[in-house]
Image (tube, rainbow, N blue to C red):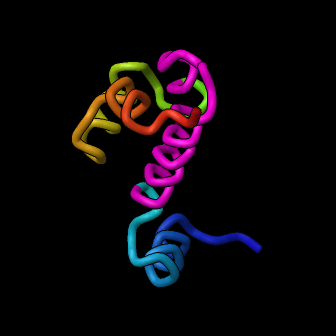
Amino acid sequence: MKLSREHLARLVAQEFGISPRDYLRAKQLRRAQTLLRTTSLSTTDIAAACAFGTTPSFYRAFHAAFGMTPGEYRRRHITK
């Protein structure tokens, strides 16, 4: 079954209430949160593992979403 980009965007918006771009970004950020809490991977490795284009773009997106850098998040939420 082939769907146009516009049709897929409408379906995602109907189902989740947000655009496909915002949905995917939220998934990236949730995965990054998990990796920050549960691994010792560097932020550069986490940025790559979560499909952010660059480490600076990861930092910008993370800070915009959570009001802190990935390092600050890790320090506050580390699982011991």
Residue drawn at x 63%, y 27% as measured from the top left: 39
Magenta region, main secondary structure:
helix
Q: Is residue 34 left or right of residue 63?
A: right
The tally of labels here is 0
**Depth order, front residue of 80/39:** 80
Q: Which corner quadrant of the image does residue 2 belong to?
A: bottom right
Residue 79 percent across, percent down from the top left? 56, 36
Residue at horizontal 30%, vertical 29%? 69
User: Where is residue 27 shown, x and y percent of the image?
Assistant: 53, 52
Q: Is residue 36 above or below residue 30?
A: above
Is 14 situated above or below 51?
below
x then y, percent, for residue 37: 54, 36
- Of 19 and 75, nearer the camera is 75
Compared across the picture, whether 41 is left or right of 53 comes to right
* Residue nearer the viewer, 15 or 11: 15
Say if the magenta span includes residue 35. yes
- Which of the 4 image quadrants contains residue 13? bottom left
Does 39 appear above or below 5? above
Which residue occupies the extreme front position in the image? 80
Highlighted magenta segment, given as a residue range: 22-47
Q: Quadrant of the C terminus?
A: top right
Name the residue: 47% across, 26% down: 53
**Residue at point 26% right, 35% down?**
68
Say whether residue 79 is left or right of residue 72.
right
Name the residue at the right extreme: 1
Does 42 appear in magenta?
Answer: yes
- Can you say which quadrant of the picture contains the N terminus? bottom right
Toward the bottom, the furthest residue is 14
Residue 26 falls left or right of residue 45: left
